[in-house]
Amino acid sequence: MDAWAGLDPLMAGSEIEAGSRLLYRNVAFNTYGFLNTTEAFAKAHPDYVKRVIAAYERARRWILANPAETAKLVAEETKFPLPVVQLQLSRNDFSNPLPGSEHIAALKAAAPILTAEELVRPGTDVNAVIDTLVAPSFAAGVVNGTR
């Protein structure tokens, strides 16, 4: 195989174990990961939503303060070799806990694919939907201690 598009930890594993070479990486192509809930649940149970975000925030801060321990735990739980996990984690940015403009831009960049693959209803303004769905208010309150 001459080229492969891969996701970590598979890419990191291939680099470590097979000597594969990462040819190109553009973090701007990342569509990130988000905690999701419905508007109805968030409205009915805001304290539960804040509790989940607070748990993630404690974990994020712990990861930043304990990178070696994080890698060891992830390796143990996933059964991936420690060097693979260390490489994978080195490519993750845990510094920004709040969804914002860069996340919205990344999702909007992926929107044409969703439309072309008919993963959204015809006629849907995907960009407008993204604008309304990304709501950092819960996370901002937790992260800034104003929850």
Image (spheres, grey):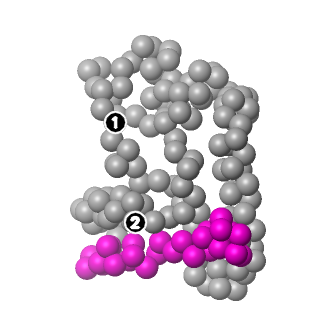
Q: Position of residue 2 (x, y in %)?
A: 26, 21
The image quadrant that residue 129 belongs to is: bottom left
Q: Amino acid at mark 2?
A: Ser
Q: Which residue bears the numbered disc 1?
A: 25
Disc 2, SS: helix
In reply to whether residue 133 is colored magenta, the answer given is yes
72 relative position to 136: left or right? right
Residue range corresponding to the magenta coloring: 122-147
At label 2, counting other C-alpha atoms closer than 10 Å, the crowd grade (few under 14, some 14-19, many 20 or more) is few
- Relative to 61, residue 37 above or below: below
Looking at the image, is mark 1 or mark 2 nearer the viewer?
Answer: 2
In reply to whether residue 78 is colored magenta, the answer given is no
At label 1, counting other C-alpha atoms closer than 10 Å, the crowd grade (few under 14, some 14-19, many 20 or more) is few
Q: Can residue 77 be seen at all in this image of the molecule?
A: no
Q: Which residue bears the numbered disc 2?
A: 101
Q: Position of residue 112 (x, y in %)?
A: 25, 63
